[in-house]
Image: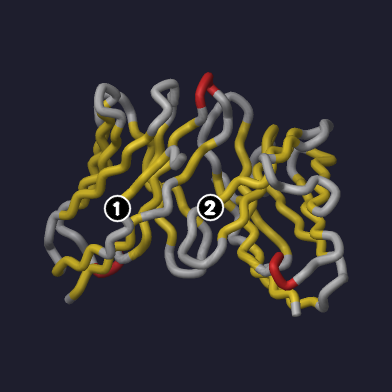
Amino acid sequence: RKEVEQDPGPFNVPEGATVAFNCTYSNSASQSFFWYRQDCRKEPKLLMSVYSSGNEDGRFTAQLNRASQYISLLIRDSKLSDSATYLCAASEAGGSEKLVFGKGTKLTVNP
Amino acid sequence: GAVVSQHPSWVICKSGTSVKIECRSLDFQATTMFWYRQFPKQSLMLMATSNEGSKATYEQGVEKDKFLINHASLTLSTLTVTSAHPEDSSFYICSAQAGGTETQYFGPGTRLLVL
């Protein structure tokens, strides 16, 4: 049973496009949510935490929908450098420190 | 801030040898460190959770006698792959978490190739 699921993609978009990723989680007790980006053959790097009220960081907007148990990431005005795999992560139930990661969604931004 | 280093970055070894990987938090104290393994095109799979001064907690299916974890200080955790076999070849990544937070910061990973 997969706890965190993502559309693997790949998403191929032109520069300047807006792209959105969704991620669903199965454990309703999960408390914390994150988006990481992972470049090819590199470690994941924290992109942003996801807060209940939604949050924005420049061109990136993250939202959480607890009722439907999904989180989303919106990238506006995409750049070539945004090409990467985006991983969502949800904390385990009961405030555990452990995170469960999705397989990631691959994004390629084309010139 | 929140820099995590990992050493070595890659290692090639013969089957049957043991390999030790170090994970260090450079600018913060990590009460908890995590060890993950990632096979090509797969998600990060948590192997174990390591708390300073106590025994590691291993995920189901991970052999604790094969993957030895030591978390001797608030800035250092080590993973030793004992008697490595080709199927242990993978990308091993650690992450560190400061006390009172849930954000994990990852090390650059170690690529292990067992011949």
Q: Three-letter amino acid code at disc 1?
A: Asp
The answer to whether A58 appears left or right of B113 in the picture is left
In the foreground, B57 or B105: B57
Are labels 1 and 2 on one chain? no
Residue B23 higher or lower than A35, as above or below? below
Residue A54 x/y as whole percent: 25, 30
Q: Which subunit holds the residue at mark 2?
A: B
Residue A13 higher or lower than A98, as above or below? below
Disc 2 is placed on an element classified as loop
How many neighbours does mark 2 have within 10 angstroms: few (below 14), some (14-19), or many (20 or more)?
many
Residue A53 higher or lower than A104, as above or below? above
Q: Quadrant of residue B52?
A: top right
- Which quarter of the image is occupied by the C terminus of chain B? bottom right
Residue beneath label 1, please? Answer: A7
Q: Which subunit holds the residue at mark 1?
A: A
Q: In front: mark 1 or mark 2?
A: 1
How many neighbours does mark 1 have within 10 angstroms: few (below 14), some (14-19), or many (20 or more)?
some
- The residue at the point 76 percent across, 47 percent down is B77
- The residue at the point 17 percent across, 54 percent down is A19
Question: How far apart are the two marked residues, 1 and 2, measured between alpha carbons?
Answer: 16 Å
Residue A71 x/y as whole percent: 29, 36
Residue beneath label 2, please? Answer: B44
